[in-house]
Image (tube, rainbow, N blue to C red):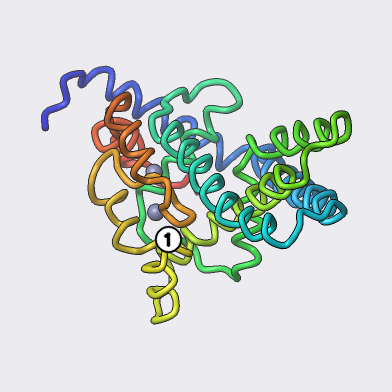
């Protein structure tokens, strides 16, 4: 498909490359990532602690698990959809946006222990600490219903587990992982591969339960990334 806006596309690429250089050269982004992952981990622990103080009952406790699995898959998938279409490379957030687009540029990620993937990838979730804080404050002021607090606590943790699920999908293989993927407990490789090979599909990356919903939303209101932000990353190499 020919690009109808070569100049605009070229400007987008230049702005994206400048933002990527900034991301790799400015130490502030490394510290921001570390601070964010610490806030995420602390917030997840505080939410889980508050939730475990408030029993939900056995049956409701069981119901909360699939609800949280769906909610985490949906929310993270929607953030992914929005970010894949974000081409605002200016300001302090621009380098973070540009760095996000690198996940389409490769099919294998740097190998590291799974606990480090959990901690490191949590550092990209700038949206999560404010969300956790809002729910902690709402619980302090209004005492949230126990099932709601449980779903929120599990969803916050599963948001980081989604990054693990995505990493496993790209970097690991095995009968158990394939089985968990087919069961819909982790991300299925074939389902997720569509996100990288095709355009504007399969944004969910915890288990893919919310993909039908997000795919419909994407086809209604979003243009896709293959001719957009994917082109902006093309040709960039990390500065030495
Ligand atoms: Zn993507
Ligand atoms: Zn992927």
Number of numbered markers = 1
| Along the viewing direction, whichever of 123 and 135 lies nearer the viewer | 135
Q: Callout 1: few (<14), some (14-19), or many (20+) C-alpha neighbours within 10 Å?
A: many
Left or right placement of residue 93 versus residue 39 in this view = left
Report if the beta carbon of the residue with label 1 is closer than 8 angstroms to ligand 2: no
Left or right placement of residue 5 versus residue 79 in this view = left
Element type where label 1 sits in the image:
loop
Residue 81: image x %, image y %? 41, 36
Residue 175: image x %, image y %? 39, 81
Residue 156: image x %, image y %? 66, 47
The quadrant where ligand 1 appears is: top left
| Along the viewing direction, whichever of 234 and 114 lies nearer the viewer | 114
Left or right placement of residue 215 versus residue 130 in this view = left
Q: On the image, which quarter does residue 127 sit in?
A: top right
Query: Does 45 appear above or below 20?
Result: below
Q: Quadrant of the N terminus?
A: top left
| Along the viewing direction, whichever of 131 and 71 lies nearer the viewer | 71
Query: Does 213 appear above or below 220?
Result: below
Left or right placement of residue 110 versus residue 149 in this view = left
Q: Residue at x 84, y 49 (%)?
A: 50
Please identify the residue farthest to the bottom as the structure is shown: 175
Q: On the image, which quarter does residue 120 sit in?
A: bottom right
Residue 232: image x %, image y %? 33, 33
Q: Residue at x 88, y 29 (%)?
A: 141
Q: Residue at x 76, y 35 (%)?
A: 135
Q: Which residue is mark 1?
A: 187
């Amino acid at each position: 498909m020919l690009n109808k806006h070569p100049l605009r596309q070229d400007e987008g690429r230049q702005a994206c490359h400048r933002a990527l250089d900034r991301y790799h050269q400015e130490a502030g982004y490394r510290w921001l990532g570390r601070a964010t992952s610490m806030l995420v981990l602390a917030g997840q622990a505080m939410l889980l602690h508050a939730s475990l103080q408030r029993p939900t009952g056995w049956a409701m406790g069981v119901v909360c698990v699939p609800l949280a699995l769906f909610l985490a898959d949906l929310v993270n998938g929607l953030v992914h959809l929005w970010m894949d279409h974000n081409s605002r490379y200016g300001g302090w957030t621009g380098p973070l946006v540009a760095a996000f687009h690198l996940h389409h540029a490769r099919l294998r990620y740097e190998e590291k222990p799974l606990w480090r993937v959990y901690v490191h990838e949590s550092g990209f979730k700038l949206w999560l600490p404010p969300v956790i804080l809002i729910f902690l404050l709402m619980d302090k002021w209004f005492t949230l219903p126990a099932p709601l607090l449980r779903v929120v606590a599990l969803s916050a943790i599963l948001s980081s587990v989604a990054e693990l699920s995505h990493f496993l999908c790209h970097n690991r293989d095995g009968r158990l992982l394939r089985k968990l993927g087919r069961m819909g407990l982790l991300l299925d490789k074939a389902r997720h591969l569509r996100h990288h090979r095709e355009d504007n599909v399969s944004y969910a990356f915890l288990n893919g339960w919310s993909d039908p919903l997000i795919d419909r939303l994407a086809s209604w209101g979003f243009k896709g990334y293959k001719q957009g932000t994917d082109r902006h990353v093309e040709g960039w190499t990390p500065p030495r």
